[in-house]
Image: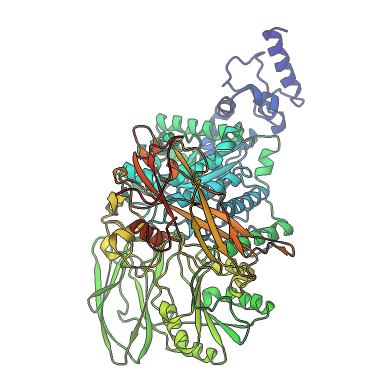
Amino acid sequence: MNAVHRQLLIALALTLCVLAGTPLISSAVVQPDPNACPINTWPSSVANLPWMQQSYQDRYSPEQLATQVVNCEEQLHPSEALASEIALTTLRFVTGTQWQNQNNWLTLTGPKYRYMPDFNSLGIPSITLEDGPIGIRYQRANAASLPTTFSNQLSLAATMDPSVAAAYGEQLGTETSLLNYQGIQAPNLNIARIPTWGRISETFGENPTLAGIMGQAEVNRLIDKVPFVVLKHFGAYGQENSRRILNQIVSDKVLYDNYLRPFAIAQQGAASALADGRKHDLLMMCSYGDINNAQSCKSRTLLSAMANFGFTGLVRSDLDVREGIGSLYSASVSLIKPQVALSNAAMELLSPQTKQGIHKAAIKVISEMFRTSLVTPTGVRDSNLGATLSTSMHNQGIRVANDIERRAAVLLKNNGVFPLAKSGSTLLLTMPDLNGTCRALATSMSQQGYNTACRVLNPPLSGGFKPFGKIANANGKIRKEASAVWVAPRTGDYFFQQQTTGNSELKVNGVRTIVVNGNSEFPYPNFTSFRATAGQSLSLHLSWLQKAPNFTITSMGSTLNTALDAMKSATRVIVMANDVGREGADRSTLELPYGYDALIKVAAATKPTSVALFTTGPVTMPWISSVNGVFEFWNGPGDATADSSIARLTPAIADLISGVTTPMGHLPITFPVATATSPSGFNNQAFWPGIKDAVNLNSAPNGGLGLGFNWYQSASWPVLFPFGFGLTYPTTDSTFPASSVSCATATATSLCLRVQPRVTMGDAVKNFTTISQLYVAPPASSGQPKLLLGTVTATQCRTTTGSLTTNAGVCVSGSTNATVTALQSGSWNSANRQYQFAPGCYSFILADHARDAFEILASPRQGSHPSAIVHATAPFSASTEITAGACPA
């Protein structure tokens, strides 16, 4: 059979697939142009479209198939084509009960939307992208048919165990697929560069290597379940105040080594899936703000970085990026999420270049849909079909969430109070934000045989004294000011509450007390507690640039008296404290809100007291010396839905308090002693929130490279709890073996070290996994900070299967491999366009936390760490020797 006969048979077979009536297939016998539209009338049935046949798809590339579809739209529906292409490449929030972020929507006039079905009629399903750093975000109601809300991503990082991130990715991906969502926007790979960031709970913490390692494990499982996985937010996004207009000044070295490294590492989690015929695909969400005067979505620096990392997937914008669609399409953004889409009149005014950019974007989006096998005879129906989870899947999600919580909670202080004794009675004290969690925890603990009660206090947050009276809004250009003198009516505890949209400042007796620089996207409450004596006067001065702040002074007297009365019959008290951190506004301080600090001090002066923290990130603890124990259980969403979400995790929380589960978590971020001695301090305004809408990311130590624990070390700031810190009940340590330190032949980009964890456990420990933290001290010639996190490894020391528990009292592992790679610990080489180990000597340190690592590095042959440090010289190769001790001076 010759080529002509074969083409005739193919054309005949396609024609026979058409229903009776006008044929869809072009009258031409052959299709010489692989990009030409193969039909000549608008289809009456999706099933009969030629590209619905797998044999037809196999003949063409995804780009050719997509071009055919777009050409069909433009030829057969020319009056609707431009609107349909814009709708296909436009993402927006969709009201209703099922979808959050879906394309094929277009605004015509005013706030109303019209659904554009043309591409659906051509068999191309809409793309639904759902947010996912804490579970599928759109549906949060506590119903059995809806998705699981997990503890936050920061708590996932606190496990420091990639297998836990993989389990999270497995469950999240499964739920996403079952609910018919085509994509999940997770993980968030931005660095928590300031501890007051409103979205800090959505991150993996302050360290780019840890973020990349955990993100890689999560992506590896997500990519097997979901057609599209969206990494976010590509760039240097790290604050909420003024985020939409912020110009982020950053060098290439700082950008690559800190802010882009997690994306480079995490992308490797999809490498096998992408290589396997590209059945699944990664998307990248570009971030808010500008990079060196260019909006992130159209930054040539960031576009080059994507190319350097080998990223070829779709790029989508975040909400309202201040750019016209023409410039975004021209910058290779294929999915745009503007606040205001185009009207018919605006479409008529688009330039030919913009229309061509829209045409190309439509082809790229549809190409990926062919590539991810979403274009099928039932694809449109499936993608628009609402779904719910089965009861068994919902329950599985809750079990996974509780398993993560058991691994994520961090024990910060323990003067013998945990595990909690069953003798006597325990009173749980909290505020309204944790009402449901408090009652659910009391129930869970009662089921374990504890005499437990819950008392929810209600400070008058909506009342309080207004010393400035009625004040007017400013115009955004000229500050307004007001002064007042407040006299304490009685001795006691009070708090200031300043609800503001930003650019406001409170001075008390001339001291800056609540400072909110930059704009927030909603009136955000800021709190500061203080104690005053009767008749004491405070001089107050308030200034603001936008809306007038709502400022009040509230007495804690009645609230504390209620607490004292509730404590009378209790043997011990656990204060359950939360903070409020959410998208759209940064916290002005790391202080607990609602007067919690005063409550904890009063409780600790009355009864043996411990604190259970449910915070979105670091908080200060002025009461730390007066309490017996502190547990960090983390706050999931951080907003009004947090209570119902955390309440589902009370089985795990009760297990941790009672000792049924041994705490294993480690802090993925430094807890400072005070806000002032942290990257969020007043003296670091250039770094946060910036000056005149510009933030200088190069102003951190080491020219901007020294973030997180390196900044605290170089600035000699006091640290409450260092990065990596976490207490537990067994005795643990990790050392290098006395011999055979290497576990594999070294290469130019990878060095494998054997790690020997040693854990001594009592009989009460049923399940335990120990984490070995491996730090790297690079040569000074690399220009990198003094200390880096190289990698983390998890060693399972005791497991329980059914009623059987491995009962060895000592866990020793000499076969745990810790691999340090240039991708994780090297520095970006712009000439070679890759991460590389700089020539010179590297020290490798096993430590309990970052502060411990600095101490070992300073005195490597002293103390209890004689075999916790080794060194080797780069460039690494098969002949590299790993030697005991630190690098020679």
Q: Residue furthest front?
A: 739
In depth, the one of 733 and 104 nearer the eye is: 733
Work out which quarter of the rendered image holds the N terminus and state it: top right
Residue 281: image location, x then y, percent: 56, 38
**In front of the other: 594 or 64:** 594
* Residue at figure coordinates x 62%, y 65% from the top left: 809
Describe residue 576's horizontal placement relative to residue 538 as left or right: right
**Percent of width and height locating residue 482:** 25, 75
Q: Residue, x 62% and y 71% (percent of image)?
A: 655
Residue located farthest toward the top when viewing the structure as drawn: 2
Residue 55 shown left or right of residue 631 in the figure = right
Q: Could you say which is closer to the camera, residue 458 or residue 831? A: 831
Percent of width and height locating residue 887:
35, 48
Q: Is residue 233 above or below residue 475?
A: above
- Residue 322 showing in the rendered view: no
Q: Is residue 690 left or right of residue 195?
A: left
Q: Residue at x 55, y 40 (%)?
A: 270
Residue at 28%, 49% (x, y): give it. Answer: 703
